[in-house]
Amino acid sequence: MDVPLSVLRISWELYARDFAELVMLDCSVATCDNNRIDWNTSASDIISGLRCENDSELEDDDEEEVTVTIETPCLFDEAQESLDKLRTFALSRGQCSMLDSVMSLQEMSESCKSNVQCKQLTSAAVRQHSSY
């Protein structure tokens, strides 16, 4: 491992450990994991848990669909790109069930995008009409 001398010195001064030990520690312990989502639970449990957190933060009695806010949101284009990669992966591996699932996800995401665009257009029309 080619590490600058200053890094080796700092690892001893701050932690009284060899730099290689610190690297092993970082790999073995989730030191940087600040993700509060437990991905081993069911999707409905994850979403309901996040909705409960949002409900406690925002006391709104609106009947509209509740959106869940997360710390590192994914843009729609990034999600689409990932789905495209998964589709290509499933196709290249000959995984029919995976390909069906990915294609279904792509249909759902397109539907979601259409709903968001429709809401944005409706909101813009309402704002424009109220300005008259």
Image (cartoon, rainbow, N blue to C red):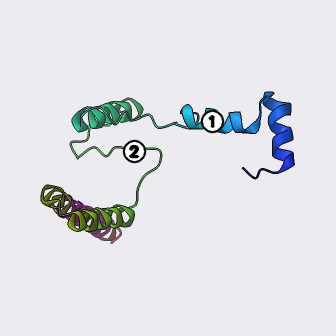
Q: Main secondary structure of the magenta part?
A: helix
Q: Nearer the viewer, mark 2 or mark 1?
A: 1
The residue that disc 2 covers is 69
The amino acid beneath tag 1 is Met
Give residue 7's quadrant in the image: top right
Q: Is residue 126 visible?
A: no
Q: How many marks?
A: 2
Q: Position of residue 106 (x, y in %)?
A: 21, 63
Residue at the (34%, 43%) spot, across then down: 68
Q: Which residues are magenta?
A: 105-125
Residue at the (77%, 30%) spot, across then down: 17
Q: Position of residue 19 (x, y in %)?
A: 75, 38
Q: Is residue 125 visible?
A: yes
Q: Is residue 50 above or below residue 117?
A: above
Say which of 69 and 97 sits in front: 97
Q: Is residue 115 magenta?
A: yes
Give residue 104's quadrant in the image: bottom left
Q: Which mark is residue 50?
A: none
Pointer 2: residues within 10 angstroms few (<14), some, or many (20+)? few
The amino acid beneath tag 2 is Thr
Q: Is residue 66 above or below residue 87?
A: above
Residue at the (37%, 33%) spot, across then down: 38
Distance Cα–Cα, label 2 vs label 1: 34 Å
Q: Earlier in the sequence, mark 2 or mark 1?
A: 1
Residue at the (69%, 33%) spot, across then down: 21
Quadrant, the C terminus? bottom left
The residue that disc 1 covers is 24
Find numbered disc 1 in the image and state the secondary structure of the residue it sits on: helix
